[in-house]
Image: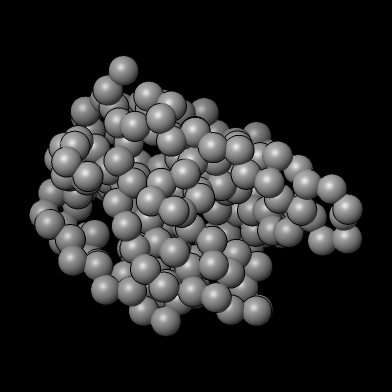
């Protein structure tokens, strides 16, 4: 089944129920899910989402992982949409306010790191890319790539990811996606799956 057009996505997002567990008193963050509905990836033209590979940094609990561009809300941000736009600009040098249409957001999700919940909520904002983007990763991102959503929806990229919690002697087998020697798992996978 193909991805619905942006207008249907926008309607569905506006009717999405709120997350009843959301705690506005905790720290907030936002990510940008930029989707190009006509992106050619590996010879297939269709919807694709922009992802980045985080740089390795010992203080970052998501060091080296694949993620959506995003980060914590700052006092300069008027709302979480502004956070998502600012972070996409900082991390990948893309201006989604000028080159994309905001379709809405998914309900916030509580962040997890190293096998446990973190006192941080993440709101994924969905964008329809309308002009070509030329990402240029900053020091927080090692690389970027486009993940084609057709193969994701068909189950062609499904993957089982072995994860060992700190202090554990056995692996958890987590669902994920494998694409071009990269594995998308954890919160990024769950956000894409919920979309």
Please name whichever residue, 17 or 190, is drawn nearer the observer in this view of the structure: 190
| Residue depicted at x 71% and y 50% | 163
Quadrant of the image occupied by residue 38: top left
| Residue depicted at x 37% and y 24% | 154
> Eyeballing the image, is 62 above or below 46?
below
> Eyeballing the image, is 144 above or below 172?
below
| Residue depicted at x 32% and y 36% | 149
Please name whichever residue, 127 or 158, is drawn nearer the observer in this view of the structure: 158
- Whole-percent x, y for residue 153 in the image: 38, 27
* Position of the N terminus by quadrant: top left
- Whole-percent x, y for residue 146 in the image: 29, 51
Quadrant of the image occupied by residue 113: bottom right
Residue 67 visible (yes or no): yes
* Position of the C terminus by quadrant: top left
Please name whichever residue, 115 or 145, is drawn nearer the observer in this view of the structure: 145
Q: How is the image coloured?
A: one colour
Decide if residue 160 is on the left or right side of residue 183: right
Give the farthest residue toward the top. Answer: 1
């Amino acid at each position: 089944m193909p991805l619905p057009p942006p207008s249907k996505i926008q309607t569905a997002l506006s009717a999405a129920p709120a997350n009843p567990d959301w705690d506005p008193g905790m720290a907030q963050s936002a990510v940008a899910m930029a989707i190009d509905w006509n992106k050619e990836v590996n010879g297939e033209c269709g919807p694709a989402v922009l992802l980045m590979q985080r740089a390795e940094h010992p203080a970052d609990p998501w060091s080296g992982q694949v993620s959506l561009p995003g980060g914590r809300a700052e006092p300069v941000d008027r709302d979480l949409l502004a956070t998502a736009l600012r972070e996409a600009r900082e991390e990948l040098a893309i201006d989604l306010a000028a080159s994309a249409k905001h379709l809405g957001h998914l309900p916030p999700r509580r962040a997890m790191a190293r096998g446990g919940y973190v006192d941080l909520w993440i709101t994924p904002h969905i964008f329809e890319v309308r002009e070509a983007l030329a990402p240029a990763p900053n020091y927080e991102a090692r690389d970027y790539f486009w993940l084609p959503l057709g193969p994701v929806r068909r189950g062609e990229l499904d993957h089982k990811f072995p994860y060992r919690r700190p202090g554990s002697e056995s692996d958890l087998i987590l669902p994920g996606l494998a694409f071009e020697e990269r594995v998308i798992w954890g919160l990024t996978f769950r956000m894409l799956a919920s979309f």
